[in-house]
Amino acid sequence: MSDDLPRHLLAAFGSPLYLYRLDAAEDAAHSLRGQLPRGAALYYSLKANPHPALGEVLRAGGCRAEISSTGELAAALEAGWAGEDCLYTGPAKTAGEVAQALGRGVRRFSVESAADLDRVARTAAAQGRTAECLLRINSARSGASGLRMSGPSKFGVHEADVLARPERFADRPGARVVGAHYFPISTARSEDALIAEFTASIESARRLRDAGLPLAHLDLGGGFAAPYAEPGERPHYPRLREALETLLSSRLPGWRDGLPAVAFESGRHLVGGCGALVCTVAEVKENEGGRFVLVDSGIHHLGGMAGLGRLVRPAATPEPGAAHPALTSHLVGPLCTPADVLGSKVPVCAAGPGDVLVVPNTGAYGLTASLLGFLSRPAPAEVFVRGRTVVSASRLTLSRTPLDTGVDLPVPVTTTGDVPA
Ligand SMILES: Cc1ncc(COP(=O)(O)O)c(C=O)c1O
């Protein structure tokens, strides 16, 4: 990114804004595909960033779409994916959303329980269709570290439960069980951790297949890491391809011929590095011995989940080529809550109002994971560039749609605040 590009973009689109470099997302997809087993499919997880402009380049780069809501489905279709390129995942799917997805061409679902499989099957059968279902499996823990998505949790079915009651997970009218889906970890700490996790999943899939589970498709999930709102490069996995090819060949020979067809998923690794939040300093103040840099962006634009203590807190970073020395500061936003902290005791190169700060590596779980509605402030513009050329710019808006209140309800509707007797 050129040093003066953020300032030019702020002048054109207002502050703050998200700047995304499409070529960086393309590079990330190309590079990750080159580190995976040859012939494996790669799904882009739209939860990391559903913007169709990013989806378009990842689709062109050979990725499919992993979606978990009808909103993500709409974004995937806008990006040019067909319904049949999408894998619909996630717990607590409703019959309504499954029906919508089927109606828009989605055929493959990851199901998280026997009840989820029943629901998808009933909904598909009612449309005269048959859904292809992957069972989301929780297997034994590999012991690898990262953000765990398995073990006792709302996700998936334990492998032992499938082995104990296979009839609960068999084909039925409306659903054909075609394989298994694993996603035990996000953000694996190391290549070894990643390999350990995939090994545990492949071993589990082999056990299930030996017990009779159909295994035409094996989605091994991801766990590919990326720096989040701090400087750094996404990790490379130089040993991964060979390790996985060797393992697959010994445990599931036939995978090279597509039996099973192997797939992976990634959100943050593909798009984290392409985005930066560019914001402007409103005020610098000393308060009770602390130095506070107040900016025009906060947890409503970045790291809202971090503000709730769910993920690591972002670190502040200087604008590239910043003129001021970095001073230890609290980087805080404009929201009326002490949780509105982008960085605590971090080096910030800002002397006063008008200085520009850039928070790098915020292409994933930036805007989409933030408290956008809180305090009713506008969303930042999202600006997409190739080199120095702006190829698209947009702003997400929240608006209220009035609903019809003339419906018959079994309880009286009161507008006075009284609770009806
Ligand atoms: C099923 C599934 N797939 C993909 C992802 C994307 O994870 P990441 O952005 O870490 O690659 C997640 C994250 O929660 C997930 O639950």
Image (tube, rainbow, N blue to C red):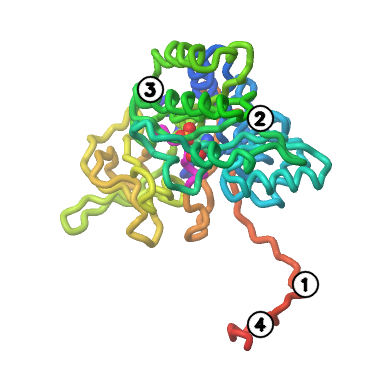
> Residue 220, relative to residue 309: is it above or below?
above
Structural distance between the alpha carbons of marks 1 and 2: 42 Å
Residue at horizontal 44 percent and vertical 40 percent from the top: 150
- Determine crowd level at label 1: few under 14, some 14-19, many 20+ residues with C-alpha closer than 10 A: few
Residue at horizontal 28 percent and vertical 32 percent from the top: 323
SS category of the residue bearing label 3: loop
Could you tell which of marks 2 and 4 lies nearer the N-terminus?
2
Structural distance between the alpha carbons of marks 2 and 4: 50 Å
Range of the magenta residues? 359-369
Residue 378 appears at what percent x and percent y?
53, 52
Q: Is mark 1 within 8 Å of ligand 1?
A: no
Horizontal side of 17 relative to 344 (left or right) equals right
Residue 344 appears at what percent x and percent y?
27, 47
Structural distance between the alpha carbons of marks 1 and 3: 55 Å
Residue 377 appears at what percent x and percent y?
50, 56
Instruction: Report the residue marked by disc 4.
Output: 414
Disc 2 versus disc 3: nearer the observer? 2
Structural distance between the alpha carbons of marks 3 and 4: 57 Å
Label at residue 7: none
CB-based contact (under 8 Å), mark 4 and mark 1: no
Instruction: Report the residue marked by disc 3.
Output: 235
Structural distance between the alpha carbons of marks 4 and 1: 13 Å
Q: Is residue 385 magenta?
A: no
